[in-house]
Amino acid sequence: MYYLPSHLPSSSSLSRFSSYRYARESLVNFRWISRICATRSHRLLTSADRLPVEITLALSQHGQFAELAYTPVPLPHLFRNIHILSREHFPLEGYDALLDSELVYHTRGKVADVQAFVVYRPSTRQLVTAFSGTSNVAQCLYDLRLSHHHYHTGAVRRGRVHNGFWKMFKGLRLSIMRSLEAACRRHQVDEIVLTGHSLGGALAYLFALETLSAEYALPPGIKIIVTTFGAPRTGDQELVDYWVELVDSYRAAHGPDALREYCVKGYRDGVPAIPPASLGYRHFCREPLYFVHGKLYRIPSSEREHALFDIEPVADVEAPLHPRGGHNYYNGRNMENAFRRLQFLGDIIEKRSDGWEDRYLKRVRKRHFHTIHGAPLHNLVTLCVAFRRRRCHSGLNMALQSVT
């Protein structure tokens, strides 16, 4: 049994693998932002709020695309070699959702060079559009533009949006929407998935707003799924109210499952707590989700602006894989280690493109990466692979529908 503590585990209480992992952290995990800005809900999350493991697995698949958006390796190279790169010891080991995906479009925004891409998944008839989180200095500077900007699409002018997010969104808007229109003409598409981690989550919501509020040549009533991980607040209350109106109207016209949204906050991740609510910012999602130690909990609507929650005691066979939480520990994966391996691969390809597989493995083995993402294969990844082998795509999709 464990009760999720309100403090971080001490170094002495961490396992050998956890101590090694945290000692090698180089990316910012925003735990200090969580200490300063995050508010703690008085509502205890219980087993009644916990979502089935099928939901966790389905959202984990969306998360694979959100994480890939950070890659420094050219996306065409990754998708051409995806069956090699998903093998043991390679950067995308365990990223099984990528195996049946076809790269449709990739770009970098005109503002701050934000990376985004669109893939088609024949097995699920989905177009998945993923947006990168903050990955360079220019994007960081736009993140710090906390002033409000009027939100407008055509003649519609409702609420205010984060100035920096709005600028980066506009740098991608036309190219992404045109690519979605073209992809819908070429493929059999049942759903459009918009996903991203951190800044990418904010952009995913702005594109969802664009899809609902503007007129594009997309199939009428096409299903839309918004899945975000560690996303910051993006707009003010008036813009959130406009989003809710659009969602309710779309569902009324095309069915309750026509739009589904999953805004996932993580344990000790400070990014969902910023920009502060005191500056007028609010979250779009009425009932966000809370990810802690491999489990997902539904957050009641009344508590949606909080970023920290206590969890009732639960019986677990194994200790948490990522006990300290943080911004880069969603979906049971350590995003930093995957990104580090992709950087190794990018350096190798840049020097010489031939024979990159052998040279990559030599470098990885030299650095003693003998486990997936710096730790034993997590049961969540194992379950993802098992579900794929049993061809449970339809089951996962039904599980996602059941949470709305």
Image (tube, rainbow, N blue to C red):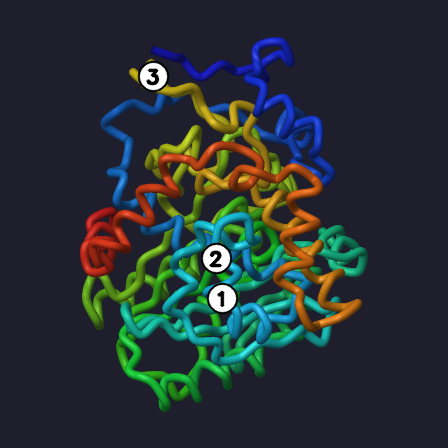
Q: Nearer the viewer, residue 106 or 388?
A: 388
Q: How many marks?
A: 3
Mark 1 surroundings: few (<14), some (14-19) or many (≥20) residues within 10 A: many
> Image check: 8 left or right of 319?
right
Q: Quadrant of residue 109?
A: bottom right
Q: Nearer the viewer, residue 97 or 119?
A: 97
Query: Residue at label 1?
Result: 82
Query: Residue at label 3?
Result: 312
Q: Are marks 2 and 1 in contact (CB under 8 Å)?
A: yes
Q: Residue at x 30, y 63 (%)?
A: 259
Q: Residue at x 26, y 66 (%)?
A: 258
Quick check: 162 above or below 73? above
Residue 136 in view, yes or no? yes
Quick check: 346 above or below 322? below
Q: What kind of residue is marked 2?
A: Ser
Quick check: 142 above or below 337? below
Query: Residue at label 2?
Result: 86
Q: What kind of residue is marked 3?
A: Glu
Q: Residue at x 58, y 47 (%)?
A: 232
Quick check: 355 above or below 332? below
- Percent position (x, y) of residue 402? 20, 49
Q: Is label 1 in a helix, a strand or a loop?
A: helix
Q: What kind of residue is marked 1?
A: Ile
Mark 2 surroundings: few (<14), some (14-19) or many (≥20) residues within 10 A: some
- Percent position (x, y) of residue 57? 33, 46
- Of badges 1 and 3, nearer the viewer stands 1
Q: Is label 3 in a helix, a strand or a loop?
A: loop
Mark 3 surroundings: few (<14), some (14-19) or many (≥20) residues within 10 A: few
